[in-house]
Image: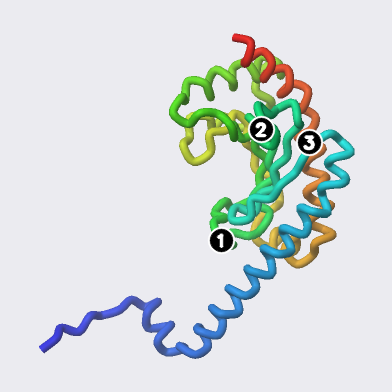
Amino acid sequence: MAKRVHGTAGDEFIFERWAEVRDLSTAFRDTMLKMRRRFKNTAKQLQGPLKSQGYEVYPEGYWAEFKTYRPEWCLKPDEPLVVLAVGGVYPAGYFRVEEPSAYLALYLEGFDWSKPQDYRRFADVLYGELGGRPPGWEDRTGDDDWRTPLWAAIPDTGDKARVALARDMHELKKFTLDQYQKLFAIGDAITQALQHFSSK
């Protein structure tokens, strides 16, 4: 006789409400796909304003990140060594978004992942250009999930605030442009750091 497997309380909740959970799951998946389309459309709307400031932009949909770079940060066309990100702008649970808040980051996008010493060396050069690591920014260079010398949570961007952004493309665009002004303040220092790093 087969042994009965006892489920968890969560299992029982789903079994007792199977039809409702099924329909809710389908609606959730459909809504996420709509959110992804809105996200891509917002990236297109950001192209003009950001290009006028000297930056290219592209979306990283699964992590709800917008990434920008200056052309001079590229070794080859459209292959930047570093990118500035406004990320996690959708609530946790949207595809691969896990952070409890939105965030700003400088990713070492084009660096060789097999040479972590280069991450550290560039981070030190960048901090030199900035006069030290700016207050409020974390160094996650040694974190394999991030590999960023500058990372900062954006205050007051819990799930409720990010659901509001997901509902309104205009607000998402405005929010993203406002956050990028903070990042663009270090754009010249990044350019100088890359020049010094490459010359050594």
- Residue 95 is marked as 1
First along the sequence among labels 2 and 3: 2
Q: Amino acid at mark 2?
A: Pro
Disc 1/disc 3 C-alpha distance (Å): 27 Å
SS state under label 3: helix
Residue topped by disc 3:
182
**Image point (78%, 36%), residue name:** 182
Disc 1/disc 2 C-alpha distance (Å): 25 Å
- Categorize mark 3 by other alpha carbons within 10 Å: few (<14), some (14-19), many (20+): few
Q: Does residue 30 appear to the left or right of 4 in the view shown?
A: right
**Foreground mark, 1 or 3?**
1
- Categorize mark 2 by other alpha carbons within 10 Å: few (<14), some (14-19), many (20+): many
- Whole-percent x, y for residue 65 in the image: 66, 49
**Image point (64%, 50%), residue name:** 60
Q: Residue furthest left?
A: 1
Marks 2 and 3 close (CB-CB < 8 Å): no
Q: Does residue 97 appear to the left or right of 1 in the view shown?
A: right
Marks 1 and 3 close (CB-CB < 8 Å): no
SS state under label 2: strand
Residue placed most toward the observer, 1 or 80: 80
SS state under label 1: loop
First along the sequence among labels 1 and 3: 1
- Categorize mark 1 by other alpha carbons within 10 Å: few (<14), some (14-19), many (20+): some
Residue placed most toward the observer, 12 or 64: 64
Marks 1 and 2 close (CB-CB < 8 Å): no
Q: Amino acid at mark 1?
A: Phe
Q: Residue furthest front?
A: 77
Q: Residue furthest top?
A: 200
Q: Amino acid at mark 3?
A: Lys
Residue topped by disc 2:
80
- Whole-percent x, y for residue 35 in the image: 68, 66
